[in-house]
């Protein structure tokens, strides 16, 4: 704080009325030996990958006096090729849009399709950012609870869509914080009756178990479907802040109306293209993480805990009468997890084998003491 600056507090400023009681979103960023709280990929890039990305960024710097390609054609074609490879569905670059994280992609969807007098529908427990997109865009959020095993109650969902006619339906598959994926048939049933756009947030798609289908397979027949993905999780590129979606090009026309003019910098575009060129290496630990995830589910269940099925790189487990005590107990052992989901549950991101070892040891000690 510079002593010569006049002070002002937030309550002196003309803050929007609806923001006055709000808190800023964000998981605690604590410096702990074992961080298993924000679903990052625990493996840093290899030295050769670092060099590959750094070279791409250095080349981009040569034209840093110019604004970037507003429509990031090269990045879109890399993303289209990757999605085609991952899902077997032919995806064209004209069906891809990207932004600074899939958070920004979904916010743009709300800016274009939500708004005052309009509503969205989501299913809880849900990703807390959904509240924020609605708040920011003055969209009313309706929520429905998921069932006991964290799936959709399809009849209830259909009734609610008929009643509220939401402009945006948010389906998350695999869901955060529960880890559960939705059957493609449920998504199709919702697409058949939803009047607006249906967003399937597939931030964790690459971790899905064998046989679980991506909603990308529904795109050819469903022009109001938007499937969002990210490089932040499986691609171990959370620091790059790049997310994207696949959808009809008419939806992308709508997103171009609300995006800021040059929202993806030359550096972001170059780094993301380099990461996608090296996709095999970027994704090389996904199978190890899935195996560790399955082992974690089995181990937690063997301890008598309730554990949601997981198609993601995290596991939600409980039930604890006082989850905060368990959370702080783990923290005292240097292990940071997340208080997420229903009040008696915690969520642990899947780390390296060594980190999961520390997690298990710490949890045993904490459970013996509370
Ligand atoms: C992590 C996450 C995202 C997106 O993250 P970005 O880093 O903004 O791409 C989106 N949805 C869910 C459910 C997530 O957990």
Image: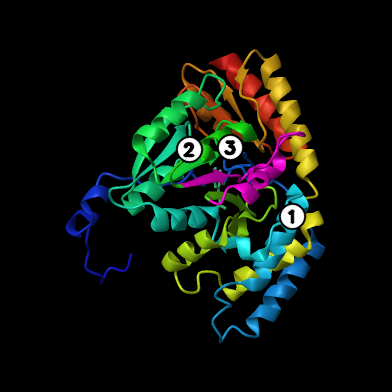
User: Magenta residues?
Assistant: 197-223
**Residue that label 1 marks:** 84
Q: Earlier in the sequence, mark 1 or mark 2?
A: 1
Q: Quadrant of the N terminus?
A: bottom left
Given residues 276 and 330, the one toward you in this image is 276
Residue 193 numbered tag: 2
- Colouring scheme applied when the structure was drawn: rainbow
Q: Earlier along the polypeptide chain: callout 3 or callout 1?
A: 1
In this image, 157 relative to 349: left or right? left
- The location of residue 18, given as percent across then percent down, is 24, 48
Q: Residues within 10 Å of mark 2 (few under 14, many from 20)?
A: few
Badge 3: few (under 14), some or many (20 or more) residues near its Cα, within 10 Å? some
Q: Residue at x 63, y 46 (%)?
A: 40
Picture coordinates of residue 202 (x, y %)? Answer: 61, 44
SS class, disc 2 = helix
Q: Are marks 2 and 3 in contact (CB under 8 Å)?
A: no
In the image, what residue occupies the spot 73% across and 51% down? 89
Indicate which disc residue 188 carries.
3
Name the element at disc 3: helix
Quarter of the figure with residue 291: top right
Q: Nearer the viewer, mark 3 or mark 1?
A: 3
């Amino acid at each position: 704080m510079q002593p010569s600056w006049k002070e002002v507090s937030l309550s002196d400023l003309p803050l929007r009325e609806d923001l006055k009681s709000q808190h800023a979103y964000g998981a605690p960023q604590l410096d702990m030996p074992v961080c298993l709280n924000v679903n990052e990929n625990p493996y840093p890039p290899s030295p050769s990958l670092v060099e590959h990305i750094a070279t791409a960024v250095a080349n981009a710097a040569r034209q840093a006096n110019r604004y970037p390609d507003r429509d990031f054609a090269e990045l879109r074609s890399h993303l289209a090729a990757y999605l085609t490879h991952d899902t077997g569905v032919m995806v064209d670059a004209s069906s891809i849009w990207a932004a600074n994280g899939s958070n920004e992609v979904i916010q743009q969807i709300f800016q274009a399709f939500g708004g005052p007098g309009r509503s969205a529908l989501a299913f809880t427990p849900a990703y807390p950012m959904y509240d924020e997109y609605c708040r920011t865009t003055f969209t009313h959020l309706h929520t429905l609870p998921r069932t006991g095993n964290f799936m959709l109650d399809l009849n209830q969902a259909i009734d609610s869509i008929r009643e509220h006619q939401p402009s945006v339906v948010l389906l998350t598959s695999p869901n955060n914080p529960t880890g559960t994926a939705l059957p493609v048939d449920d998504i199709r049933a919702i697409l058949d009756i939803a009047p607006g756009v249906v967003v399937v947030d597939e931030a964790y798609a690459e971790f899905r178990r064998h046989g679980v289908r991506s909603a990308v397979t529904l795109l050819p027949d469903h022009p109001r479907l938007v499937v969002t993905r990210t490089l932040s999780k499986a691609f171990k590129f959370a620091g790059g802040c790049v997310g994207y979606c696949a959808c009809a090009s008419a939806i992308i026309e709508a997103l171009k109306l609300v995006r800021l003019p040059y929202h993806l910098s030359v550096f972001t575009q170059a780094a993301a293209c380099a990461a996608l060129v090296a996709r095999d290496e970027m994704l090389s630990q996904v199978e190890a993480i899935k195996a560790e995830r399955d082992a974690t589910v089995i181990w937690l269940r063997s301890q008598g805990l309730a554990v949601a099925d997981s198609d993601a790189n995290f596991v939600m487990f409980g039930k604890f009468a006082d989850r905060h005590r368990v959370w702080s107990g783990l923290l005292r052992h240097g292990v940071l997890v997340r208080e997420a989901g229903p009040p008696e549950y915690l969520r642990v991101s899947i780390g390296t084998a060594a980190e999961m070892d520390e997690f298990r040891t710490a949890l045993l000690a904490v459970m013996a003491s509370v």
